[in-house]
Amino acid sequence: MSSLFPALEGRPDPAGRTVAGGQAALRFGARSMTYAELAGAAGAVAERVAGAGRVAVWATPSLETAVGVVGVLLAGAAAVPLNPKSGGTELAHIVSDSGPALVLAAPGDELPPPVSGLKRIDIDVRATGGGPPGAVDTEDGSPALVVYTSGTTGPPKGAVIPRRAIASTLDALAGAWQWTADDVLVHGLPLFHVHGLVLGVLGPLRRGGSLRHLGRFGTEGVTRELTDGATMLFGVPTMYHRIAEALPSDPALAGALAGARLLVSGSAALPVHDHERIAAATGRRVIERYGMTETLMNTSVRADGEARAGTVGVPLPGVELRLVEEDGSPVALYDGETVGEIQVRGPNLFTEYLNRPDATAAAFTADGWFRTGDMAVRDPDGYVRIVGRKATDLIKSGGYKIGAGEIENALLEHPGVKEAAVTGEPDPDLGERIVAWIVPSDPEAPPSVEELAAHVASRLAPHKRPRVVHHLAALPRNDMGKILKRALTGG
């Protein structure tokens, strides 16, 4: 029987190493836990939630959230992480749709009305009565998490993530990143989604390593932790952008990053401009990986591979990946130019959208490939480069299929552009025209459409130049830093 957390059970990890109970497991600010303490506290949670099908967790960036989720998984139940920043309507939908038996929260946390009606258990991170937890099999498809993901229409859908998907993804990443019990991970990600929770909390615990959570992301915290023995940094592009901006005047940050073993970016594409600025200042390249709530991780640049800026690496072991044309036929040639939709198969996939058999059926092909909705090109050596979402980032202009991402990268190389997003809008002649949304470096002297069009045309093909430019004070973003392109409308 294989379990998610062998270190908590005194078992050897997948590499055959046994972790001592006194080893550091988790640290959030000044609060920390050893593996022995985590086993006791999570075991106590497991005892209290035993028999529950689904358990909501009020997912603040805290020790309590980590202990609560681990305890639910040890009990064989499914955790439903709740975003504390969600509005009342969204929370009400998630609670109603997932039907949790109870909610776990940190003592003193005030829960809003949609959640406060549930039976509540406060998480005691110093509990010791749980004892060593028993192993819960990870090989089957039993639910581990129900993570809600927003679609383009309608309320969020609950993606049911099985235990085998978590084990498969984390073990594949361990191989790709040479991730071991000796690694100390630092990040400041929220804990209600795959990046921060699965990779950022469950990942180090499965390896027998440790996590240091920053609470709120800041370059000072990154410098402190990487200087004090942390080996890996996880972040999203907005975090790495702040790092890139700070590096010229912060030699301590540059030195800390230079000493890290691995810098990983995910959840959205990291602009090539920021890649290059970080590499120039530190001598280290950020590696990217590609995943979704429904698939966990699909591809990654390997720690011993080429950190090719603008790509998300190659498929992870066990993951099948193909690009398909609009009619569903496979792309005939991987030449680094032909755009297709990514479809994937493998043990890393979710099993269903909770209570949505229609949406589940629509998400898969008849032979089991998941339709990601992400558009990409693939190089002859297998490297994948995401060019955008099918719904918002694929622009059909003048007979060409154009990905917004490469135009955004080109725009960001212009000194007058601080941030950039690209969309398409109807055009009677071209079908769609390319529209750039720019946050100028100097609001008093923004670059003109002619200047930006010439800049892009000098780097990419002329048909990829923007025809319209809007200047904004800021781009609309979600909690993960992803640009909300559907909010970019108007003249």
Image (cartoon, rainbow, N blue to C red):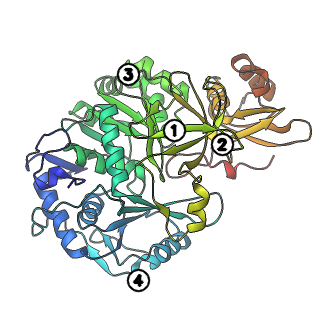
Q: Residues within 10 Å of mark 2 (few under 14, many from 20)?
A: few
Q: Residues within 10 Å of mark 1 (few under 14, many from 20)?
A: many
Q: Amino acid at mark 2?
A: Ala
- Choose mark 2 or mark 4, whichever is in front: 4
Q: CA distance from mark 1 to mark 2?
A: 39 Å
Residue picked out by circle 1: 321
Asked whether disc 4 touches disc 1, contact meaning CB atoms under 8 Å apart, the reply is no
Picture coordinates of residue 464 (x, y %)?
A: 75, 27
Q: Amino acid at mark 1?
A: Leu
Q: CA distance from mark 4 to mark 3?
A: 49 Å
Q: CA distance from mark 2 to mark 3?
A: 32 Å
Asked whether disc 2 touches disc 3, contact meaning CB atoms under 8 Å apart, the reply is no
Q: Secondary structure at mark 1?
A: strand
Residue picked out by circle 4: 117
Q: Earlier in the sequence, mark 1 or mark 3?
A: 3
| Front-lying residue, 144 or 277 | 144
Q: Earlier in the sequence, mark 4 or mark 3?
A: 4
Residue at left 84%, top 32%?
A: 398
Q: Is residue 329 above or below residue 90?
A: above
Residue 366 falls in image quadrant: bottom right
Q: Amino acid at mark 4?
A: Gly
Rendered image: mark on residue 473:
2
Rendered image: mark on residue 284:
3
Asked whether disc 2 touches disc 4, contact meaning CB atoms under 8 Å apart, the reply is no
Q: Is residue 197 visible?
A: no
Rendered image: mark on residue 294:
none
- 129 vs 400, left or right, is left
Q: CA distance from mark 1 to mark 3?
A: 28 Å
- 122 vs 85, left or right, is left
